[in-house]
Structure formats: structure tokens, C-alpha cells
Image (cartoon, rainbow, N blue to C red):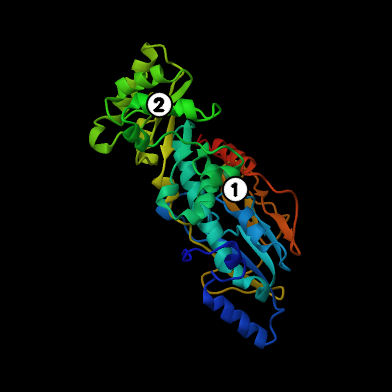
Amino acid sequence: MDKLFIADEKDVRDGYTMDVYFERTKKILESCGMSKTEVCAEITGSSLPRKWEWAVFCGLEEVMRLVEGLPISISAVPEGTIFRTRTADSVRVPLMNIFGAYADFGIMETAMLGMLCQPSGIATAAARTKIAAKNKTVLAFGNRRMHPAISGVLDRSSYIGGCDGVSSKIGGDIIGQEPIGTVPHTLMLLMGSNDAAFKAFDRVIEKEVPRIMLIDTFSDERAAALEACRSIKDLKGVRLDTPGSRRGNYKELINEVRWELDMNGHKDVDIIVSGGLDEVSISEIVDSGASGFGVGTSISNAPTLDLSMDIVEKDGNPISKRGKFGGRKHTYRCPQCFQMGVSLKSDDRIMCSCGCEMEAIETEIIRNGKRVGKERTPSQIRDYVLKQLNTIGEL
Ligand SMILES: [Zn+2]
């Protein structure tokens, strides 16, 4: 079969996906006897897309897996950290510092940035969606809008940002949970009726899989919701994916279905809502009878962050290009309001304008090519994100 247009893991590790100028730089450094020139390179962001005030740092574990074994050391803020790109006096805040000979890691720059920029954008969109959903369930259904080669990355990032479940099998494996799905409209169309499809699902699919039936295929959602209750004894929920042209007032429709379910003794049947939802449309319907939201494109198509890698020290001396801040900097953050701080010292005392003392939040994660400390699971990283959203009063 003809090859697909995707890079496999070996391509990424071998530098086949890098921007070619890094390879040329390496070649020149080697020919000039500078392959051992030691640097400190930092990864920072200038500003955030869509005027976001903060973002979720995501993708670090994959970067660690990529560079483990290279003769370099790395310090970084923990994955899942909610950060701002600049301090109050506008200094760019390092999210990661890399120490070693540039020739040894320069060819990884493209891959490292890509592994951080896109996942951090997705995790941030997921966190903002979770806030809009007022901590109700948010399920990530956005894989179909993106290239399948990155499904696992999309799902992991969505989950870390705060989504409660993901839809792909690879995503489920990566986050250590069963993937979540309901039924596609296709099943009802092929089986000819809601009842036939609901019963067939219930008969064929393993009992552990929650029964959540789609109720907008043929008839009125209110009638179909009750039909689902009659067809399936252990019905967990119904899903409304009502097309925009038929929605009218979506919030009223959801409330009407909720009322009908409650009135007929089905208070424990959840209502999951999906269909082109984003943080704005969710905030409009969040105070309805819906208990959860399936969100696709608005999370998976989140803007990528504009992070960059820059050399800030050469052979132990500060150096930087125009527009960047030289010197190896340590990253601090206010534990209350998440204002950021930087210092050339690792044990500085920096007071935040809110009155709290900032904490040093950077830790060493790779020392001479070896991982320092234990790997954190996606679920631990997600808990850290949700805790921080709570601290800043967003959840
Ligand atoms: Zn503060």
C-alpha cells in the first residue's frame, strides 16, 4: 500500500520532521569545531492567542520521552501549570530551560516546540470549556476534525485541560481510562427506528459500557427520550445533538426533555448535549437540565501557542537576540493569583503585587539525559490543573 503522509516515531526522533535549517546549523557548528559549545536555551511565550490571560502548560511528558538519552539537562515548570507568558514588568517567563551543547539538541527544537505549543493550546481550550460548563461533565469529541495521526495527543491534552472523558481508543489507552462514546445517527438510520437501534445496542454491547442514547434522529426529542427509557432498562443518559436548524431555543428544549424525564420517573437519566458547542454556547445553556456536554472542534481546533526557544547563555555568559532577555532565569509564581516572576537566582524572594510571596516553580526533570523523579500520570496532571482553576476562583 502507498505510504500515508504522516511521520512515524522514528521520523520524529531522527529529525526527519525538523525544519531543515537546524540540520544545516549543526553541520556548520561541527565543521567550525563548535559542536561542544555549551548553552542554556529557554522556552518562552510572547503573548497568548485570543487575548487569553493564562494558559495550561501541556506536552512536557512527550518532550521528556523525546529527549531522554541526549547528553543534556532540563529544568521546567511542571506539566499542567497554569502560567502567564510575562511577568508584571513584561519579562518573558521561561517554561523550560535546556542545558547542553546546542549541537546535541538543536535538531529537536521543531519537535519539542510542536509537542508543547499545540497541546498547551488544546489543554487551555479544554480548561476554559470546563469553566464555562461550571464543572459539569465535558467530553472531548473533537478527533474527527483533526488528522488521525495526532488523536492520542489531542485526547491527552483535552483530558489534562479538564475534560472528563475522551472518545478515541488510543486516547483512552494514553490517559488510562475507557474511551467514551454513545451511538452515531448512522445506527438508527440503518436499523430503521430508535427502538430497534436502542435494543440492539443494549443486547450487543458489553454491560460495563454506559447506555447513552441519541434522541434526535427521527422524532421529537421529548418523545424519543421516553422511548429510550422504555427500550433500555439501565439507561444512563440521553444525548441531544439537535441540528442548529431545528434547535429553536436549545436551553428550553433541554429543560423540556429534563421535565419530561423527571415527570415520568427518570430523574437519574442524564442529558448530554453536543453539536458545535464552544465555551460561549455552553455558558448560554449551562444552567439548564443538561448534566454534560460533548465538545468537538472548539477544543481540538484550539489555537496553538506561540512558544519559542532562544539561547540565553553561551559558555556560562548571558547572551540573547534583540527582543529577548539574556541570562539563565528561574521561574516563580504567586500561589494566589498566578502572577509570574523571574530571577537570576534560584532562592530569591519575590513579592507579588497581591501581597503574597511567589514560589519557585521550576524543577529539574532531566539530568544528563536521565529522567529525574517519577512520571506523573495524565490523571495526576489533570487533578493539578483543576486544583489551580479552583485556586484562581474559576471553578
Ligand atoms: Zn499574587
Provide residue 135's location: percent of width, then percent of height. Answer: 49, 32
Identify the residue at image location x=47%, y=54%. Answer: 148
Residue 330 seen in the current view: no
**Label tally:** 2
Whether 207 is drawn above or below 26: the answer is above
Farthest-out residue, bottom: 32
Residue 290 locus on image (x, y percent) = 40, 27
Image location (x, y in percent) of residue 285: 35, 31
Contact, mark 2 vs mark 1 (Cβ under 8 Å): no
Give the left or right position of residue 382, taking residue 142 as reference: right
Q: Nearer the viewer, residue 219 or 107?
A: 219
Residue type at mark 1 is Thr
Rendered-image quarter of ligand 1: top right
Residue at x 63%, y 68% (from the top left corner)? 41
Image-quadrant location for residue 105: bottom right
Cα gap from disc 2 to disc 1, whole angstroms? 42 Å
Q: Is residue 103 visible?
A: yes
Tell me if 124 is positioned left or right of 248 in this view.
right
**Of residues 227 and 372, the one drawn nearer to the viewer in this rendering:** 227
**Helix, strand or loop under label 2:** helix
Which numbered disc covers residue 122? none
Q: Determine the image quadrant of residue 252.
A: top left
Q: Amino acid at mark 2?
A: Phe
Placement of 132 over or under 43, stated as above or below: above
* Residue 47 pos. (x, y %): 47, 58
What residue sits right under mark 1 in the picture?
Answer: 81
Who comes first in sequence, dot 2 or dot 1? 1
Residue at the image point whose x is 73% and y is 68% from the top: 71
Q: Secondary structure at mark 1?
A: loop
Q: Residue at x 48, y 57 (%)?
A: 305
Q: Which mark is residue 198?
A: 2
Q: Nearer the viewer, mark 2 or mark 1?
A: 2
